[in-house]
Image (tube, rainbow, N blue to C red):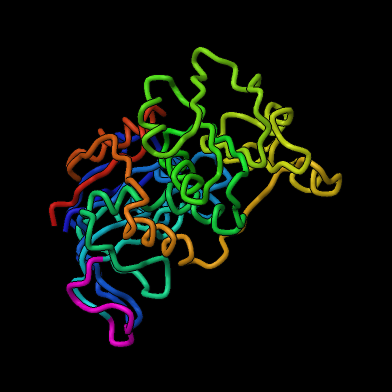
Amino acid sequence: MKASFHEKYGPPDVLKIREIEIPTPKDNEVLISVKAASVNRSDLHVLTGKPLIMRLFTGLSKPKSPVTGSDFAGQVAAIGKDVSRFKVGDRVMGFSGGLGSGSHAQFYAFSEAKRIVTMPDNISYEQAAACLEGAYYAAMCIDQLKLQPGQKALVYGATGAIGSSYVQYLKYYGVYTTAVCPGAHKELMHSLGADKVIDYETEDFTKDTERYDFIFDAVGKTSFLKCKRLMKKKGMFFPSNGAENFFLIPITRLLGGKRVMFVSSGNVNAGLDLIRGLLEKGRFQPVIDRVYPLDQIVEAFTYVATGKKIGNVIVTMGA
């Protein structure tokens, strides 16, 4: 089979397309004929080995898993003898986590006990792949908040895979939502459910007159201290990254009032179940920026590295 392969950390051009053996599924695994997957920010971090702390998990000097990719949409081609949840021919989608594990390949073996569900009938493989990594991270947070109609939220970086998912989940739960993004995408944000759009290129979002129950930084480019004045007395700030934000988690919790929050992964399939349910109801719209064939994986990663993608970048495997 063809696979996206890298023997060392580095920029996208360290990637090569190689012919490698099709994996044999273990007793508890399904073998998936991968049809589509995303190239996302997590994949880029794994490829480059940055931030360096990631290498504690992905390999100190070189990648433990040379095949890139962390999510997938495809069809079950074979099953291990102990598999009971899936059968050959099932259309499935799943997410292995943000540390990369080899889904940018024409076939992929994956445990049935992990983050994998059957696909809704009303979407394509490309659309399913656009409902995974970013949508999953946002769903894991939303699933634990017990949102109520009438609450208010601001999403910073609302056009990305995570941000566009936040906007749609918040709309579903009746939360008044402000999207912060380039003004060129105002129409898209309103179509996804945003009540208000702030163009950060021409406006200072921190001067907004609204006060919010929740602020979600979906791209890791703002901070609790910058957003604090926008928050209600018991408001919560959810960072994407940044040492400053994470250092403030225990401090703000002890002080009470406005606080920085960290959400654990919880039930591994809860996020995917939420996504699938909304897809079946027509309440979630996969946002796809570009689609590349596997042979153009370098171009796909190069585009993601620009930081300008809208929603998701998808690769198709041709399997």
In this view, which residue lies farthest toward the front? 150
Residue 215: quadrant of the picture: top right
In this view, which residue lies farthest toward the left? 318
Magenta residue check for 240:
no
Residue 266, image x, y percentages: 57, 64
Residue 308, image x, y percentages: 38, 27
In the rendered structure, the answer to whether residue 207 lies left or right of residue 254 reads left
Residue 99, image x, y percentages: 46, 53
Image label count: 0
Identify the main secondary structure in magenta.
Answer: loop
Residue drawn at x 27%, y 36% as measured from the top left: 300
Residue drawn at x 20%, y 66% as measured from the top left: 75
Between residue 234 and residue 218, name the one nearer to us: 234
In this view, which residue lies farthest toward the top? 202
Between residue 285 and residue 161, name the one nearer to us: 285
Range of the magenta residues?
80-91
Residue drawn at x 36%, y 38% as measured from the top left: 311
Quadrant assignment for the N terminus: bottom left
Residue drawn at x 42%, y 61% as measured from the top left: 272
Between residue 2 and residue 198, name the one nearer to us: 198
In this view, which residue lies farthest toward the bottom? 81
**Please, is residue 82 above or below residue 59 in the view?**
below
In the rendered structure, the answer to whether residue 220 lies left or right of residue 191 reads right
**Please, is residue 174 above or below residue 309 in the view?**
below
Residue 32, image x, y percentages: 24, 67
Quadrant assignment for the C terminus: bottom left
In the rendered structure, the answer to whether residue 224 lies left or right of residue 78 reads right
